[in-house]
């Protein structure tokens, strides 16, 4: 039977509820600074999240929501420039503390590290966004706890492709059976399961109504000792928040 050796965390929606008030705001500010009349409302952004990757999401927006021919007039270089501007704006939001970690994240990272587990990140977002979030939201020594950060364009195919998780597993030098993943969305769950990972999903407003079959647990969050989670699917036993004991029990009960 495999020992649970590492936890692999998605970023956006999982470590932090970062899409609606973070990425979306940064995209709109970048569009405005570029003199574009593009505006992504909360509702439209929920549709655009169907596509992972900010550059890919802008291209999707042009092709699906803008007048015919406009996408052809915006070349990939322009998309890349807009994305770089957006990333600059987004990292500034993070550095100003505008995007906190979700409840239970800092506690679980610290507990898991103290229990001797390795930690990794597997995300579609760009690397500067990850380092800015971790730098600003975790104690300085915590950054050394993260063995592998697999982010953004290090793989060609983004979630729901499992490639980013394969990349993280290679970096850890571990097989999927020795690890457990945390995700927030159907695309992320498909990516993690596609890499053979047992997966816990903590939903958010954009993902709470998605089909999340295959998750070991679906929760409204990781919970805290004084703030229990709500189990939306799966069996958490008597646990009221995600801790090392719960992830070890779920991993030990794995039968696939
Ligand atoms: C979420 C994504 C990212 C972010 C935007 O990634 O799909 O594209 O929405 O970040 P995950 P970028 O849930 O895997 O963390 O603009 O840097 O892509
Ligand atoms: Mg996510």
Image: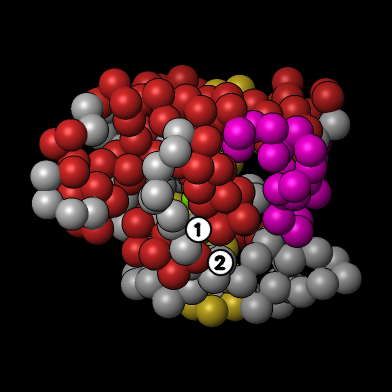
Image mark count:
2
Location of residue 243 with respect to 1 vertically, above or below: below
Q: How far across and down, in percent of the image, does residue 163 sit?
A: 30, 33
- Does the magenta stretch mainly form a helix, a strand or a loop? helix
Whether the residues at callouts 1 and 2 have beta carbons within 8 Å, the answer is yes
Residue beneath disc 1: 184
In the image, the segment drawn in magenta is 89-116
Dividing the picture into quadrants, the one containing residue 154 is top left
Q: Residue at x 65, y 78 (%)?
A: 230
Q: Tag 1's secondary structure?
A: loop
Relative to residue 31, is residue 248 drawn left or right? right
Model colouring: secondary structure
Q: Is mark 2 within 8 Å of ligand 2?
A: no
Query: In the image, ligand 1 is in what quadrant?
Result: top left
Location of residue 81 with respect to 117 vertically, above or below: above
Q: Residue at x 76, y 74 (%)?
A: 228
Residue beneath disc 2: 204
Q: In the rendered image, is residue 5 in sight? A: no
Q: Is mark 1 within 8 Å of ligand 2?
A: yes
Q: Residue at x 46, y 20 (%)?
A: 171
Point out which mark residue 135 bears: none
- Badge 1 local density, few (<14 within 10 Å), some, or many (20+)? many
Location of residue 39 with respect to 171 vertically, above or below: below
Location of residue 21 with respect to 88 vertically, above or below: below
């Amino acid at each position: 039977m495999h020992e649970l050796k590492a936890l692999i965390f998605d970023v956006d929606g999982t470590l932090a509820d970062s899409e609606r008030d973070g990425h979306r705001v940064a995209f709109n500010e970048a569009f405005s600074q570029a003199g574009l009349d593009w505006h992504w409302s909360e509702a439209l952004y929920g549709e655009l999240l169907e596509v992972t990757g900010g550059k890919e999401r802008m291209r999707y927006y042009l092709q699906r929501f803008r007048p015919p021919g406009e996408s052809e007039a915006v070349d990939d270089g322009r998309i890349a420039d807009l994305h770089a501007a957006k990333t600059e704006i987004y990292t500034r939001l993070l550095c100003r503390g505008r995007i906190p970690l979700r409840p239970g994240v800092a506690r679980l990272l610290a507990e898991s590290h103290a229990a001797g587990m390795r930690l990794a990140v597997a995300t579609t977002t760009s690397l500067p966004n990850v380092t800015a979030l971790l730098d600003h939201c975790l104690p300085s020594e915590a950054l050394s706890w993260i063995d592998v950060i697999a982010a953004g364009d290090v793989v060609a195919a983004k979630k729901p492709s499992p490639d980013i998780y394969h990349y993280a597993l290679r970096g850890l030098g571990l097989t999927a059976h020795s690890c457990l993943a945390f995700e927030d969305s159907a695309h992320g769950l498909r990516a993690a399961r596609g890499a053979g990972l047992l997966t816990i999903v903590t939903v958010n407003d954009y993902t709470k109504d998605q089909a999340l079959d295959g998750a070991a647990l679906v929760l409204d969050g990781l919970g805290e000792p004084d703030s229990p989670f709500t189990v939306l699917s799966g069996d958490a036993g008597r646990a009221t928040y995600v801790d090392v004991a719960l992830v070890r029990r779920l991993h030990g009960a794995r039968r696939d």
